[in-house]
Amino acid sequence: MTRKPVDTGAPDRLYTVTNGRSSVDDTLDLVTLIVAECQPTTGMQSEHSRILTLCRHPTSVVEISAELELPITVVRILLADLLDTGRITARHPPVNPSLPDPALLKEVLHGLRNL
Amino acid sequence: MGSAISELPAHRTPLADAAETGLKIVVVGGFGVGKTTLVRSVSEIRPLNTEEVMTEAGVGIDETSGVAAKSTTTVAFDFGRISLNDTMVLYLFGAPGQKRFWFLWDRLFSGTLGAVVLVDTRRMDDSWYAIDRLEHHGTPFVVAVNRFDDDANHHSLDEIRQALALPDHVPMLDCDARVRQSGKDVLITLVDHVYTLATAQEATP
């Protein structure tokens, strides 16, 4: 499972993809599920278009990152663009103050035992 | 099903349209301990790989304008996926144990249900740092000993617990990361442990 890191030798490419932005929208967790709310349109940035195609079915932020071969930070920036314009919606994971809800854990156990 | 090393489809199958809750468990361990093998044995997709990059100057600071020389940290990790039911999906992350990884822990793995520390008895030193960091972060974890065929001096779990100075309340178990059922048992042991902690916490006002 080795692959050439995308930043090696070509950091400029990442800035091109994000239009020079490097700030991060931390509200998008690795396992936040993204759903496309529209079809890709012509003239759209290719990464945005790929995300919309990928997210016809719910797709996690980390899977989008792996599929696009772009670091998480870059993907978060791209997703923020699409969220701002309502072209995707985000299904966020539960936020646990310290430990997860026992009822949720029970469901997880049930799912694992049935695998 | 069962003990066979599963063949996974070449293409990533999409999640159910009703999927709404993403959860995560992190498998931490040294190089070559079998993290990817464990992820692969229980995952419904062929493990994928990605990475996070961040500039050290950006840690904890909301700044984008700095032009001074920055050092960049890159952490690569594998992950797999398990659909628990129509709405819940569990992501399993295989993460390296070295220092630059912990630097990104909060960014990547905050909110994890818990962690599995995968141990190779031939290189137990690799596990100390991970155990120390998890205790520091207050992340519930279990220790799974991946038994390799060529492990000549087969240490008992008690011996390993002593060697790692692991408190009694941390569950330990043997596993074979290649075997699906064994991988499932590791995850169930972890979630069971977190469940016990969570119900105990709920009981205390």
Image (spheres, rainbow, N blue to C red):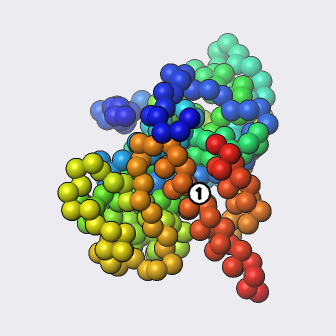
x%, y% of residue A111?
69, 48
Judging from the image, what secondary structure is the residue with disc 1 in? helix
Disc 1 residue type?
Ile
In the rendered image of this protein, does residue A70 appear above or below residue B154?
above
Quick one: A101 or B148, which is closer to the camera?
Answer: B148
Q: Chain of mark 1?
A: B
* Quarter of image, res B185: bottom right
Quick one: B186 or B181, which is closer to the camera?
Answer: B181
- For label 1, the residue is B188
Image quarter in which the N terminus of chain B is found? top right
Residue B97 seen in the current view: no
Residue at 71% x, 16% y is A41
* Number of other residues with Cα within 10 Å of mark 1, as a class: few under 14, some 14 to 19, many 20 or more: some
Residue at 29% x, 50% y is B148
Image quarter in which the C terminus of chain B is found? bottom right
In the rendered image of this protein, does residue B159 appear above or below residue A33?
below
In the rendered image of this protein, does residue B69 appear above or below residue A63?
below
